[in-house]
Amino acid sequence: MSEVVDAQRLKVFVLAEEDPRSELGRLLKEQYKTRQDELYGGLSGDERAEYDAKAERIDELKKQLETNRVI
């Protein structure tokens, strides 16, 4: 795993050489778990920011995969 820090100074862990489809699946599972956690106990500001950063990455991956499918 390598550590990446995004613009909001959040630490996001990326698996080395993870393909976009696998990364998308992993992030969607993590988002699902976070939504469950939010339902039962809420999210801190940091957790909300991390959730939002992952949501942006999910959108990027979906666009990338859609573009690759069209070509």
Image: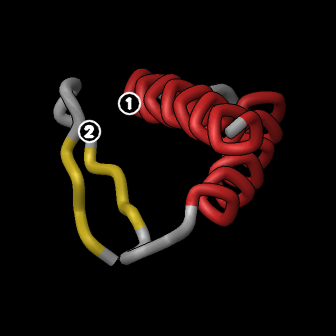
Q: Disc 1 residue type?
A: Asp
* Residue 31 located left or right of residue 2: right
Give how far across and how far down residue 18 sits, in percent: 50, 71
Q: Is residue 19 above or below residue 43?
A: below
Q: CA distance from mark 2 to mark 1?
A: 8 Å
Give how far across and how far down residue 19 sits, in percent: 56, 67
**Crowding near the residue tagged with mark 1, few <14, some 14–19, many ≥20 C-alpha atoms within 10 Å:** few
The quarter of the rendered structure image containing the N terminus is bottom left
Task: Judge by depth and name the residue closer to the eye, 61 or 3.
Answer: 61
**Is the residue under label 1 in contact with that under label 2 (CB below 8 Å)?**
yes
**Tag of residue 46:** 1
* Residue 55 located left or right of residue 53: right
Label 2 or label 1, whichever comes before in sequence order: 2
- For the point 38% across and 30% down, the residue is 46
In this figure, which residue is indicated by the disc labeled 2?
A: 10
* Residue 44 located left or right of residue 6: right
Give how far across and how far down residue 27 sits, in percent: 64, 50
